[in-house]
Amino acid sequence: MSESLRVDLLVIGWGKGGKTLAAKAAKAGRRVVLIERDAAMAGGACINVACIPTKALVHAAATRRPEEDPQTYLAEAIRNRDSLVAKLNAANRAMLAGSVTVVIGEARFVGPRRVSVIADGERLEVEAAAVVVNTGSGPRRGGVPGADLPHVHDSISIQHLARLPERLVVVGAGAVGLEFAQMFAEFGSEVTLLSRGPVLAAEDEELRASVLGVLADSGVSLVEGVEVVEVTPASVVTTAGTFAADAVLFATGRVPVVPEGLGAAGVDVDERGYIAVDEQLRTSADGVWAVGDVNGGPQFTYISLDDYRIVASQLLGSGGRRRDDRVAVPTTTFVTPPFARVGLTEREARERGLDVKVATRDVAKLAMMPRPKTVGDTRGVVKVVVDAGSDEVLGFAYHGIDAQEVVNVVALAMRAGVSATQLRDGIWMHLSSTELLNEILDFG
Ligand SMILES: Cc1cc2nc3c(=O)[nH]c(=O)nc-3n(C[C@H](O)[C@H](O)[C@H](O)COP(=O)(O)OP(=O)(O)OC[C@H]3O[C@@H](n4cnc5c(N)ncnc54)[C@H](O)[C@@H]3O)c2cc1C
Ligand SMILES: NC(=O)c1ccc[n+]([C@@H]2O[C@H](COP(=O)([O-])OP(=O)(O)OC[C@H]3O[C@@H](n4cnc5c(N)ncnc54)[C@H](O)[C@@H]3O)[C@@H](O)[C@H]2O)c1
């Protein structure tokens, strides 16, 4: 049997941007269908397999006491993570229940704004006035011999290991590589991190050294400037020698996940295979938008959420919001302690010929921010780059506790035109990590 539906909005994929849009549009009285291909992915990657489960494991690893048995501890951490994910997954289902028609099955375009899906053994066709593609990205697997051996993992499968590997080799040192390398070292594995080029190459040297220092202290052996040649059942063969491994993680970036039938829908992709969009996230097909990782923008949950705002402004509002409205977007890599940045590095600022004032401090030496001392983690370094003429904060990088919070304050200041002096003279709660701004920005 086959059924056909005509609705106002069809969302393909249960990602952050799409689910938020589906809920808002339904609340505004629109008829909305959301199609998700995997029942276990209710709520999308972030809550089920990416941000949240990995940060739960990072926290568990960082708080393991040396006397705790690594195998038992990992098993417990995985159980706790599973229980958290199950709760979030259920909450996400509940959020759309009763307002959005959710269909579980793989969506495939069969024409302009027309999609076909097999759900519960039946074929359903959905035609919509507006279609939003939110199908995400998937891990890029290593294209070397042996990369499909059973002990070779991506960022999802490595989270479900039955036993902690004695020796783990991590290939790729982006956010995933850094977070997992340190996490597994702290769980008790012997970890080797292999990187093609220098790790955190875009960062100023003080920050790079600080992050690499904590990785080394956690027991991660870093090898830079190396290419993987082959994976064997017990090793990773590289241009810099052979590394023993009973598990291997490929953390070598992401590839787009696009629905089949983009041609039938008139939706173009770019040279990397991501759906091509303009500054309002419109695709080449009228009435079709792409949000989240699949549109080739920065791959963060909060960017997918901002993509939602851009599409919502067109479908439910006055249509003004654009991608190029984004200013001072912060990032955080969740090593322990975390490393956050917003804006320019000193090197970038100087390369642009800007006249800058720069301050760098070790967290341990910040007299006006006692919080790290009270929680027993004084690792890290903080650096700020200020325009000497305008007093504008050009860049801020902080490796230390609460970095993911402090960077948001600085990012907001940069967006709102709050000067470095105003940030320095801010009345910041004692004890908070924000207090570091009172000290680091005091150039006097
Ligand atoms: C290990 C890891 C850790 C991360 N940590 C962070 C972090 O700490 N902070 C952060 O901001 N970002 C983090 N990210 C990035 C973040 O997870 C992604 O940017 C974000 O989840 C992308 O969401 P999205 O909106 O693109 O869609 P997704 O959440 O990827 O959802 C896409 C959905 O579409 C479904 N789908 C695909 N094709 C079809 C189809 N044809 N039909 C129906 N459904 C389909 C998929 O099953 C999936 O559920 C992390 C990523 C990884 C891999
Ligand atoms: N804390 C966070 O916000 C967070 C955490 C994890 C992931 N993410 C997001 O997920 C995405 C994916 O992360 P990722 O770390 O997989 O990707 P990435 O693109 O950040 O890093 C991949 C690294 O692997 C290297 N590489 C690629 N192919 C290689 C090969 N064959 N051999 C050796 N090295 C190779 C690349 O040069 C790069 O340094 C990122 O875009 C990131 O934004 C965010």
Image (tube, grey):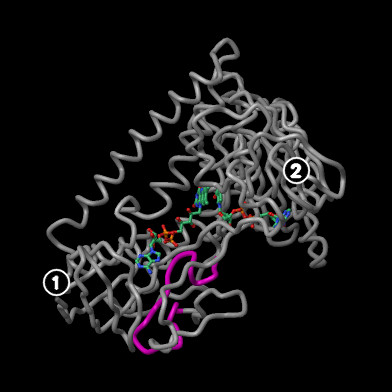
Residue 444 seen in render: no
For disc 2, does the CB lie below 8 Å from ligand 2? no
Lower position in the chain sequence, tag 2 or tag 1 = 1
For residue 98, side relative to residue 243 (left or right):
left
- Distance from disc 2 to disc 1, alpha carbons, whole Å, reads 56 Å
Q: To which residue does mark 1 refer?
A: 29
Q: Is residue 283 magenta?
A: yes
Q: Please identify the quarter of the rendering in which residue 136 is found.
A: bottom left
Residue 95 seen in render: yes
For residue 228, side relative to residue 25 (left or right):
right
For residue 23, side relative to residue 309 (left or right):
left
Q: Which secondary structure dominates the residues rendered in magenta?
A: loop
Q: Which residues are magenta?
A: 280-297
For disc 1, does the CB lie below 8 Å from ligand 1? no
Return the x and y of residue 321 as percentages of the image width and height.
Answer: 41, 75
Q: Amino acid at mark 1?
A: Gly
Return the x and y of residue 249 as percentages of the image width and height.
Answer: 63, 44
